[in-house]
Image (spheres, grey):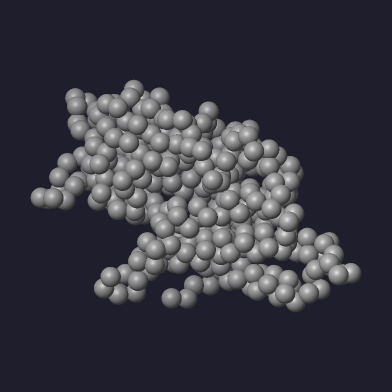
Amino acid sequence: MDFAFELSEDQRALRQTLREFAEAEIAPHAAEWDRTGTFPAQTVRKLGELGVMGLAFPEQYGGLGAGALSFAVALEELARVDSSVAITVAASVSLGGVPILQFGSEAQKQKWLVPLARGETIGAFASTEPGMGSDVQGLSTTAREDGAGWVINGTKAYITNAGTELSSFVTTTAITGERSPGRPEVSTLIVPVDAPGFEPQKPYAKMGWHASDTRELVYADCRVPAEAMLRERGAGARIFLATLDVGRIGVAAMGVGLAQGCLDHSVAWANQRCAFGQPIAKYQAVSFELAELKARIDAARGMVFRAAALKDAGKPVTEAAAAAKLMASELAVHAANVAMQVHGGYGYMEESAIPRFYRDAKILTIGEGTSEILKLVIARQMGLSV
């Protein structure tokens, strides 16, 4: 399926604005945030003031109505400098906000989306559990009706944005009954972070994304009102799959951004670092490697933009999102490895950005569906019986 797109003048201007912001407001602090595990709340607020948190949302909900392609452009520029900031924005918008935009009532949109779009709050999406990832039918968290509301019990794992000073709500999947014998009824509820019985645990000690908030969540007789139900009861599986499509475009854009950051650092280093009397850029072993990396980044970027443009046009996006995420995430790991090799010993030192890029890259092949799950999704979209 072909779908043509071209960045508009506004989107090119957005790219330039975000590049300047990232270089001035994020790059000088990224290493320290990474070293100390500091969540950059003030920077997230500034991104809200710039309109980044509201790019994907209509104006009536505090956004700019710019759509998925503009948001992908923004995420790429953020990840080019720091993936922790990028995933904070991506998770809040694509995972926290978009499900409410697509499936929420008018009252839910006004209550939760407006402050999120302004960067005053951030949201989260909680589906993954210690014993369940991409299989939504494998949920163990439950929600039972009790009077005028719901009582939730269970544990969620590896959830982003649920425990910061800006965190507002966690859109949560849970079993609310039985659809048919042996087949659970899955629903989605919006859980405020101040709900009784909602217990965020301490942040994980992670390999990468040190400046983003990731933690386990415990729901211990967590009570939410009836109006917390997103869409109708039993719509949880549909909401989950639709959320993954949007989330995968965001992660793919981050993969392209991280790879571009690795390339930018490597080109600068190759022109500066001398060996045997000349810059290492003059050796084909280096220059050809970087040339190939540039070509692969351009190809992956095209896949991301195509998936985002399809989303903006209201066309099916499952296969395109999965393919873009598969290619871009694997490319990010490759780019980080190339950058480490080009930088040599200096690339192994924490005073350079390369170790941070290296640590941050791998999770892109895992979150929002592992590479193996994405291949399964693509195969099924092709009509293969797998």
Q: Which residue is depicted at the point 63% across and 34% down? A: 36
- Residue sitting nearer the eye, 122 or 107: 122
Residue 27 image-quadrant placement:
top right
- Left-right relation of 381 to 3: left
- Left-right relation of 148 to 160: left
Q: Is residue 83 above or below residue 5?
A: above
Decide if residue 249 is in sight here.
no
Q: Which residue is depicted at the point 62% across and 59% down? A: 336
- Left-right relation of 189 to 167: left
Q: Is residue 375 above or below residue 121?
A: below
Q: For the N terminus, give its image quadrant.
A: bottom left
Q: Which residue is depicted at the point 82% across and 65% down? A: 271
Furthest residue toward left: 181
Q: Is residue 311 above or below residue 240?
A: below
Q: Position of residue 153 (x, y in %)?
A: 27, 32
Q: For the C terminus, give its image quadrant.
A: bottom left
- Left-right relation of 71 to 172: right
Q: Position of residue 152 (x, y in %)?
A: 27, 32
Q: Position of residue 6 (x, y in %)?
A: 60, 68
Decide if residue 190 is in sight here.
yes
Q: Position of residue 113 (x, y in %)?
A: 46, 38
Q: Which residue is depicted at the point 34% across and 22% down? A: 196
